[in-house]
Amino acid sequence: MKKVLILFCLLFTSVGFSQTEELEHLNIELAFEKTDTTKVNTCLKIIQLLYDAKDFNKALKYIEQSEKLSSELGYDRGLAETLYFKGLIYNEKENYNNAINEYSKSKALFISLKDTLSIAKIDSRLGIIKIKHGNYKSGIKDALSGVRELEKQQPSGELAKAYKNIAKAYQTIDVLDKSIHFYLKSLDIETNLNDIEGTITSNKHLAKLYLRKKEYYKAIKHYKHILDSPKGEDEALRAEILPKLGGIHLETGEYSIAEDYLTEAITLNRELKIDEGIVLSLNNLASLNIQNSKYELANDQLSEAGNIARIINNKEEELKTYLLTKTLDSITGDFKRAYAMQREYHKLKAKIEASKLKEVMTPIKAFDTPTDNVTDHSAIYDSSTQKSAIALANKEKLSRLKLVFYTLLAAFAVALLFFVPIYLKRNNQLKYTQELEAKNQQIKLQNEAILEQSKHLENINNVKDKLFSIVSHDLKDSLTSTKGFIDLLKEGSLSQAEFQSLLPELSENANNASLLLFNLLNWSKSQMQSLEPKPSLFDIQEVFQEKLKLVEQKIQAKKVSLVDNTTRDFVYADRSMVEIIIQNLLANAVKFCRTEDSITVSNSINDDGKTIISVSDSGIGISKENQRKLFNNNTFSTVGTNNEKGTGLGLTICKELVELNKGRIWVDSEIDKGSTFYIELPKNKVGYPILN
């Protein structure tokens, strides 16, 4: 026993002094301590330091002696702690079978000691191992069991890590809300503990999860938290985050912001030679350039991105490259290459999905990695008799295998002679069929494009016909009436007094004709060739302020009060089209107001994150029957409170323009109580695939 203790001391003092003062001090203490539980506790402190420093091999030497001494002293707590550290190190070395074994032995001791906190830590660790190897249900159950006990204690890094591992498990099985919940809990603890690396990791995962849920502004918030952290100026970290931020702003339609992020991202990643960041930046820049009709530049960027993605085996970015190239080719009319890209896209997508499915379906496996520094002497045999018996058995087994092999080889040769001609014939037929299918698919793509163009042209012609029908009717009436007044004045049939009395009506006719031409010409100017809006982000309050000035004189003439409740808020739409819509609604509000009535304009954000614009008046209101006629394709007009005539074009154009901008328009009105027209418009671009 005395020799063992001396050897024990010598081993600990000769393993080597750490570079840290604390480790050096503990080694000195250990050399002079009595052989009792104090020595084991000091040893555990050294093991903790070595584990934190990831010096696992040296830690295992201390563990071996600590385990031996704890057993000799009957010190269960020391033995339990030692075995727990042993399990931790085996887990770090991916020797999971031995890790589970050591955790289980440690847990049994902690159960006898009624140490619920330590049991919880082990349950959490065991759950994590199961989760890592596909046993999600049982693993999450064990991990949650451990977490519930850890939550009773002071928040710690151990609890944050447990939360994070549960979040990863839920993320793997696509239970996104649960995953977000646990990442947020982990982030909260890491923030309070000032764990910079931990907060960065949690913010990355949260941003990625919010992207999958299409909650883009939440994703932006978490990425910006990373850039605002103490490590935010680290070039490698910025190179990773910037292209992702650029991709999100592409999705929200904020192209100028996206361009700023992506320009910095591609420059930084090229300087640092980070291929992953270069590919992501190139794909996002190509997407931006497709939006801006810079097709040649986008094609060059996609070509480079595809080559790099294949070299570094980044399947996800290669998949995006195929999808973007197919989109680009469809726009530029290269249908043959578009079909080829579509085929490559689906082929690669199938491979990725199959790989993910295999990973998820793989059950927890038995680990055969031998225990480090442990020798099972019972498994070693030196008997020459046994060796001879084994050699003889192996020889007989080899003879039988040879016989079976030659029999199978002969059978295979016969089968080959029979099936090869059939296979060659079938292969030729299959190749012909595939070529035919490829040609049919190419023709189908071309036909779809032609049909789409035909439908588009038909819609253009229908709207143009409708517009000219409206114009020929309303403009003719206004101009004929005005010409009649002028002819009477010219012929001297009107006295000066009669002319003065008819002058307001003449002015109203001129205003009607002016508004009609304003509607028609402005709408034509706003992409009449293609009837496609050119959306951008702009402040809706600015548009209201501009258009209220145009009706200010009419409002004062009628003694109508104006209430402006608009606030600064951005919408994503064609500004010129929205200007036409608001001017028409304001003109209608003034038209149907009586003296001393009021007009209220406002804007707000609804629960779906879209902007609601309203123009309200306390005028004469609209009957239920007439409300149903307002937005029909045919014109509908009534006389205003001062006998103002309508053009019949305004609300028809408003409905067309709102729908072109992916919005909707509706009215709420009661007779003698007034009317409120509502417009819903998006705040960002919807429907274009984001590139992560």
Image (cartoon, grey):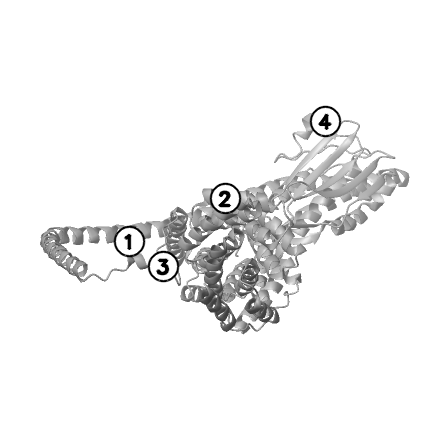
Spatial CA distance of label 3 from label 1 is 54 Å
> Residue drawn 59% across and 65% down?
238
Q: Considering only order in the chain, which callout, 4 or 2, is on the residue closer to the N terminus?
A: 2
Instruction: Kindly identify the amino acid type of the residue bearing the numbered disc 3.
Output: Pro
Q: Considering only order in the chain, which callout, 3 or 4, is on the residue closer to the N terminus?
A: 3
Residue at numbered disc 1? 435
In percent of width and height, residue 383 lies at: 20, 61
Mark number for residue 236?
Answer: none
Between disc 2 and disc 3, the foreground one is 3
Between disc 4 and disc 3, the foreground one is 3
Between disc 3 and disc 1, the foreground one is 3
Between disc 2 and disc 4, the foreground one is 2
> Residue drawn 60% across and 59% down?
200
Instruction: Kindly identify the amino acid type of the residue bearing the numbered disc 2.
Output: Asp
Question: Neighbour class for label 3 at 10 Å: few (<14), some, many (≥20)?
Answer: few
Spatial CA distance of label 2 from label 3 is 26 Å
Spatial CA distance of label 2 from label 1 is 54 Å
Q: Considering only order in the chain, which callout, 1 or 3, is on the residue closer to the N terminus?
A: 3
Question: Neighbour class for label 2 at 10 Å: few (<14), some, many (≥20)?
Answer: many
Residue at numbered disc 3? 370
Spatial CA distance of label 2 from label 4 is 66 Å
Question: Neighbour class for label 1 at 10 Å: few (<14), some, many (≥20)?
Answer: few
> Residue drawn 76% across and 42% down?
602
Instruction: Kindly identify the amino acid type of the residue bearing the numbered disc 4.
Output: Ser
Residue at numbered disc 2? 142
Residue at numbered disc 4? 623
Q: Nearer the viewer, residue 32 or 422?
A: 32
Spatial CA distance of label 1 from label 4 is 64 Å
Instruction: Kindly identify the amino acid type of the residue bearing the numbered disc 1.
Output: Glu
Left or right, 100 with reference to 260: left
Q: Considering only order in the chain, which callout, 3 or 2, is on the residue closer to the N terminus?
A: 2
